[in-house]
Amino acid sequence: MLRYTLKRALSLGLSLIVASLVIFFVIEVVPGDPASFMLGLNAQPDTIAALRAELGLDVPKFERYLTWVGGMLQGDFGLSYTYRTPVTEMIGDRIWVSLPLALYALTLSTLIAFPAGIYAAARRGKAGDMAVMGATQFGIAVPNFWFAMMLVLIFAINLRWFSAGGFVGWDKGFGAAMHSLTLPAIALALPQSAILARVMRSALLDVLGEDFMRTARAKGLSRRQALLRHGLRNAMIPVLTIIGMQFSFLLAGAIIIEQVFFLPGLGRLIFQSISARDLIVVESVVMLLVFLVILVTFLVDLAYAAIDPRLRART
Amino acid sequence: MSLSRNILIGGLLCLIVVSTALLSFVWTPYDITTMDIPNKLQTPSATHWFGTDHFGRDIFSMIMVGARTSLAVALVAVGIGMGLGVPLGLWAAARQGGWADELIMRGNDLIFAFPSLVIAILITAILGPGALNAILAIGIFNVPVFARLTRAGALPLWQRDFILAARVAGKSRALISVEHILPNVANLLIVQGTIQFSLGILAEAGLSYVGLGAQPPTPSWGRMLADAQTMVSFAPHLALIPGLAIISAVLGLNLLGDGLRDWLDPKIRVVRT
């Protein structure tokens, strides 16, 4: 297990280095010099040069890259060009909206998908299965931001159970904060749960045909007992893969949902920074998102090995 | 084998969407660039089947033209994904374990590490918003999907006797890939193609919704939803109708894909993310 973990950790580190290079150099080619953008059309060349020096833009690109990466390793993302505040602080404020939202949505998605998938697999070919599968087809086809608008229309505008947007902040208490994240989380979760339920069902159906399931039944377990005790564990590999992928999708998908609900999260920060040519903020937020995605992939790989010892032996 | 219900329903939905898009080139009930403020925000009626928007434009006509945008963006994006991904996947499989295989697959992993939406936002940030850049953004994310699928489908084929026979006959790996491997993974690619197509429509709608896709005056379902957002409380049909249009197109393609998969080969498995 240790060798497996080290090997995975090495690949995690390599991916992060390559990703940081790609992000930095791709974003550096964005047209529009931040300094001249901030000073406007009538700025004198020497003023622009002075601001460029102040922002550290006159240093060679590769040196700037090293400073950026070196800073990030110590948790320092540099200073925002436009606000002159530490990027770490800006991200710190907003990640406490985006990350809880993604986790909230992932929890909801799993809570819906697991029972639905297990139920459909247990009733394969029967009316219950058809109903669940029909619902998931529909769920996959629904754009989450449209679903979000419909939720606002029904639960915020007509029923007035939730506010139509905005985030009250964690200082108003856990319950109030979660309440304001509930509609966005449902909007993100439902389409994802449809995908997850389908994966759960087909993974279980694959497992049901295995010899060890017949053995489990032969030694006297009921269908349900065999499914829950032996089937579920073996079906978890594909399901975990999809959950891992969904987390990254939910984090990124939150960018659009944040627009619908006017949530002050990382997505809105990216949009604001792009239009203000605040490249260092864009680079840092994208790097953070990619880091989270790669980290989750790493954790999912470790989880595979914990669930299925055969994978450990293979590498 | 008779065509399944999935193929029939999915095919019918796709046919409606495609023919609506094509028809919009020659005919729409109203001109979508003409404003008619006195008749703004009308609910669906006999004169305006889907009602009118805040400028009095006919929503039915805008949905027709919007279908064009959605289909064109998604189709070209799938084309980019297949055009680049399939040759890369074939190459990787032909040189399994070699440096090319390693490089292609690691490159794929790298693209997968970027959430697709983040790639799209970055690209549109660099190149500016617009339908073309949305195509590029969605297309790039399709490349690793097709490369992986093609490689996974091709690898077991290389162990088969008919490939061995072709190699003994002196054919090069490239020629074998094109003549023997490609036809045998085509089914897989068609099915994944319909799914990526439907994902492309969703992605285009999302990008247009946040203002990074098709720009005015080009109608797009996503932008219609963005425009509708502030008016949803008093004119819900503005949001309802483009949403239903997106759902029909995506649902149709997904049902068609599922049906085709079962029809072409019940054994193949397609990854949906």
Image (cartoon, coloured by chain):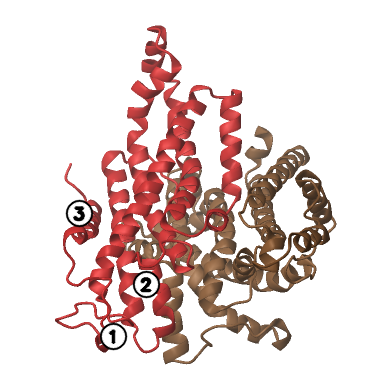
Chain colours: A brown, B red
Residue type marked 1 = Ile
Q: Residue furthest left?
A: B46
Residue in the foreground of this view, choosing between B237 and A124: B237
Residue A204, horizontal then vertical, whole percent: 46, 52
Task: Name the chain letter of the residue that bears numbered label 3.
Answer: B
Say whether residue B139 is visible: yes
Task: Name the chain letter of the residue that bears numbered label 1.
Answer: B
Q: Do the residues indicated by labels 1 and 3 lie within the same chain of the protein?
A: yes
Task: Name the chain letter of the residue that bears numbered label 2.
Answer: B
Q: Which mark is residue B37?
A: 1
Say whether residue B269 is visible: no
Task: Give the CA distance from mark 1 to mark 3.
Answer: 41 Å
Q: Residue furthest top?
A: B169
Residue type marked 2 = Met
Say which quadrant the N terminus of chain A sits in.
top right
Task: Give the CA distance from mark 2 to mark 3.
Answer: 29 Å
Residue A94, horizontal then vertical, whole percent: 69, 72
Report which residue position mark 3 lands on.
B8
Are circles 2 and 3 on residues that touch, CB within 8 Å?
Answer: no
Residue type marked 3 = Leu
Report which residue position mark 2 lands on.
B224
Q: Secondary structure at mark 2?
A: helix
Task: Give the CA distance from mark 2 to mark 1.
Answer: 17 Å
Q: Do the residues indicated by labels 2 and 1 lie within the same chain of the protein?
A: yes
Say which quadrant the C terminus of chain A sits in.
top right
Q: Residue furthest right?
A: A74
Residue A140, horizontal then vertical, whole percent: 40, 62
Vertical position of residue A98 compared to residue B176: above or below: below
Give the mark nearest the N terminus, 1 or 3: 3
